[in-house]
Amino acid sequence: MDKNLTILEKVMLMGLLPLLGATNSLKQALITAVSAVLIAVLIKLFAKLISKREDYHWYLLVGIGITLSYVFYIGIIDLFPQFELYMNNYLLLLGVTPLIYLGAAESELSFFAYQKDFFILMVFVGALREVLGHGTIFSINITAAGYPPLGFVKDFPGAFLIVSIIYLLVELLRKDKDCLKEGSEKVV
Amino acid sequence: MRKLSELTRLFLNSLLSENMSIAFFLGILFMMVESGTIKTTINKGLKYVTTVFVINILGWFLHSILPVGLDPLNPAIFFLTTILGIKVLKYWGELSGEWFGFPKLILALGPLFGSQLLIQNNGYNYAEMMTANLAYIIGGYILFVLIAAIKEEIIVSDAAPVFKSYSTLLAAIAMMALGIIGIQII
């Protein structure tokens, strides 16, 4: 089912929740992306300390992940009150996003490649949705007032649509074309 | 009569434009990955929505009996109820195997934990919580089965292989979401 996916495609699936929910504006996307990468690094460190043989290994990691999400949420509001406007529940939900647990499941080399791709994607989707949906970038108006080009992009249908288009572009631009041939198992 | 009207509106909103899966993206990944054939998804979906429904009630109840001063403990409560939900799903034979090196329980965290958080943030009383919760799971169940149906169609379609991917599935969900926005406007 999920065979032959590239790192970018896996990142889009593993980080789907923040990618859809926390990209309403570029600032929101940046805050969430930075927090997600930092939490993922911390989880990776914790994962090394916890024995993988224990049954509760993953439950413990999830508990740490959810706690870290709340610590980051409260910490950012306390340290940078000006960002409170851009905070949302998807920062709290980073603890339930598969991508931040990557360090407990993948090699170190891939780990940083995944985090880099996730960060770039979040920034790109955030910028695209802000420009198309609000007609602004970093809250600076770049279109005539009252005329955002595609207003629906800032809402949830736009999030799905933008992510689906980016996923399709990634599919079309991939170097490994063999898995796209007829009869391959590269399907949903 | 006025109260009924408010609850009806809440039910419709929670079912459509404020549904936890469509509007807040909770459980979308779980549905995309876990949906199989329509037949298997009908059973799987029932187990999934039943668990979400019960866990949401339990989470709301524990949250409401917690003294106001202990509010920071809410995430811990929701975490424990989420683990309980995962255990129930595992008991029912779900969430077995791995997904990209993760145990599949990782996929169920979003809907189980997120829906409790959503209900807490809205500050619902008991009647409102039950109404919204019921609408969430009805909407979620319909969406789960629809995603399975779309996946089946994608697999058997004559489209180029590049379109037989999650991009088409996400685009189809986007179209459904646009339809929901349209219904809401009407």
Image (tube, rainbow, N blue to C red):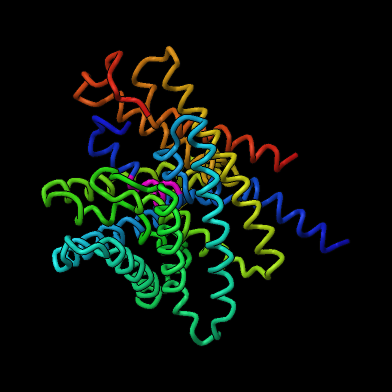
From the viewer's perspective, is residue A152 above or below residue B89? above
- Residue A83 lies, in percent from the top left, at 41, 67
From the viewer's perspective, is residue B51 above or below residue A114? below
Q: Nearer the viewer, residue B40 or A184?
A: B40
Residue lying at 56% horizontally and 40% vertically, measured from the top left: A152
Q: Which residues are magenta?
A: A14-20
Residue lying at 44% horizontally and 17% vertically, measured from the top left: B156
Q: Is residue A182 left or right of residue A90?
A: left
- Residue A88 lies, in percent from the top left, at 47, 62
Question: For the view shown, which residue lies furthest in the right direction?
Answer: B1
Residue lying at 52% horizontally and 40% vertically, measured from the top left: B43
Residue A160 shown in magenta: no
From the viewer's perspective, is residue B34 above or below residue B37? below
Q: How many marks?
A: 0
Q: Is residue A179 visible?
A: yes
In which quadrant will I find the C terminus of chain A?
top left
Q: Nearer the viewer, residue A18 or B53?
A: B53
Residue lying at 30% horizontally and 58% vertically, measured from the top left: A36
From the viewer's perspective, is residue B167 above or below residue A87? above
- Residue A56 lies, in percent from the top left, at 27, 65
Q: Is residue B159 left or right of residue B17?
A: left
Q: Nearer the viewer, residue B48 or A29?
A: B48
